[in-house]
Image (tube, rainbow, N blue to C red):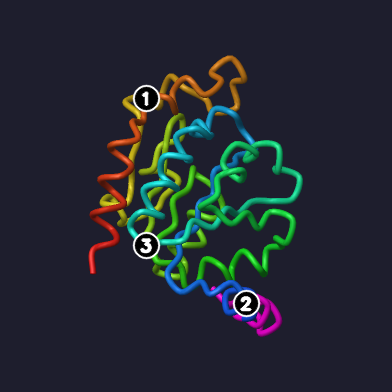
Amino acid sequence: LYTNAKDKDWWSERRTSLGIKNYAVIAPTSRWKSKQWPIERFVKVAEFLFKKGIQPIIVGSPQEKSQVELLSKQQNTLCLLDEMSIGRLLAVIEHAKIVVANDSAALHISIGFSRPCVGLFGPTDPEKVGPYNQINSIVSADVDYSKVKYRDKKIGDEIMRQIEVSDVLHKIEENTHD
């Protein structure tokens, strides 16, 4: 993957002005409700990261702002949705200490930049959609993938609710050791 100079400069200047050195990208949104881990659980992840000295940075598209409202109201988070573009997303992810994301573009970008990540999978099979060769980065629900279609609106976030906060925090610990 490649981040253009304009977007790299934007993120460098933004980080410097805010004094951010060590940060985690949190990508809590999804086009499909069935692939979205509950936002209140991402709040707990952000609190955990902040206590570890890692600044939580929320990413997504500006149109997804309502999905992250609860998380963005937390004092310990920085929400960048209003400023995001694909290029800026690349710039932010490129140097993140870790990326915590639903099965989404942000997760797959983190793999492209060889960044540590924790991918949350419900109705999509990580063996089919990736992140490939990253089994240590996956937290998934117990589901028979042959019987589930993520586009089925009746699912809601029921499958994603099977993923426990403690399991995600454990994976973060595993993937952020220095």
Q: How crowded is mark 1: few (under 14 residues within 10 Å), some or many (20 or more)?
A: some
Q: Which amino acid, by three-letter code, is at mark 2?
A: Ser
Q: In terms of depth relative to the viewer, which is nearer, 40 or 122?
A: 40
* Image: 36 above or below 80: above
x then y, percent, for residue 27 = 54, 49
Q: In this view, does 87 lie to the left or right of 53?
A: right
* Image: 59 above or below 125: below
Considering the numbered disc 1 on the image, is that residue within a helix, a strand or a loop? helix
Residue that mark 3 sits on:
53
> Which span is picked out in magenta?
1-12
Quadrant of the image occupied by residue 125: top left
x then y, percent, for residue 153 = 62, 20
Residue that mark 1 sits on:
162
Residue located 41% across and 44% down the image: 45
Q: How far apart are marks 1 and 2 (CA)?
A: 39 Å
Disc assigned to residue 84: none
- Point out the frontmost of discs 1 and 2: 2
Q: In terms of depth relative to the viewer, which is nearer, 39 or 36?
A: 39
Quadrant of the image occupied by residue 122: top left
Considering the numbered disc 3 on the image, is that residue within a helix, a strand or a loop? loop
Q: Does the magenta stretch include residue 7?
A: yes
Residue that mark 2 sits on:
17
